[in-house]
Amino acid sequence: MSMAAGALLIGTLSQVLITIRDGWRLASRIDRQWAEEATAVRLVSRLLRASLPPERGGFGARFKGDGDTVEFTSIPSQSAFSSGRMDGRLYLESRQNGSLALLLDLVPRPASPVSEKLVRTNWVVLEDLEKVEFSYFAGSSGRASRSWNDAEKLPDVIQLHADFVDKTRPSLRMAIRLHQTLSGSCVIEWTSLACRPA
């Protein structure tokens, strides 16, 4: 009797330990996914919020976007002293398993004092995506557009919508308000990134 009761107890404890282990693995995976998404939101938001308005003639800042790519010139606040203006590009890349990855290229402008090798390009922002869409909003129209080609101004808001291959993960949605409204005669203060008359 005691051996049977011991075997039953050991079997029950084994099942409890397996359940705890599986729960721990699931919690760790979800925690890792949330951390990846939070990092992606912070990075993309900071860079796009610091986008500079396009300059006439196409020789300076630029901003162009469609449903799956955004090209922009930005002054990330954390690198105002070291790198200044940087050209960025958010775009999709197909993976061998059929999923998509959202990548970021970030390159200093040629006049920048930072060397190319100090700046990492091709960061993987998000992986295992099924679909990613960028939408652009202008305050005057109030409607979303799938592309932005205005050579003289930025959209008021950019929205990113990403669906993951894993259907248990909720969709990622973020809306970013671009707030750099600089006149053509503006000089940027490198300490505060404020605009002052030229």
Image (tube, rainbow, N blue to C red):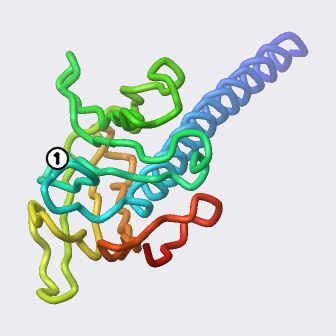
Farthest residue in the top direction? 3
Q: Amino acid at mark 1?
A: Asp
Q: x, y (%) of residue 185?
A: 35, 73
Q: In which image quadrant can residue 99 be found?
A: top left
At horizontal 42% and vertical 63% (from top left) the residue drawn is: 49
Q: How many marks?
A: 1
Q: x, y (%) of residue 27?
A: 62, 40
Q: Nearer the viewer, residue 178 or 7?
A: 178
At horizontal 46% and vertical 36% (from top left) the residue drawn is: 112
Q: Nearer the viewer, residue 148 or 128?
A: 148
At horizontal 34% and vertical 33% (from top left) the residue drawn is: 105
Q: Nearer the viewer, residue 14 or 126?
A: 126
Q: Nearer the viewer, residue 168 or 172?
A: 172
Per the image, the residue denoted by label 1 is: 68
Q: Quadrant of the C terminus?
A: bottom left
Farthest residue in the right direction? 2
Q: Determine the secondary structure under disc 1.
A: loop
Q: x, y (%) of residue 48?
A: 38, 58
At horizontal 76% and vertical 21% (from top left) the residue drawn is: 8
Position of 35 relative to 187 (above/below): above
Mark 1 surroundings: few (<14), some (14-19) or many (≥20) residues within 10 A: some
Q: x, y (%) of residue 33?
A: 51, 40
Q: Quadrant of the N terminus?
A: top right
Along the horizontal axis of the image, is 108 left or right of 62?
right
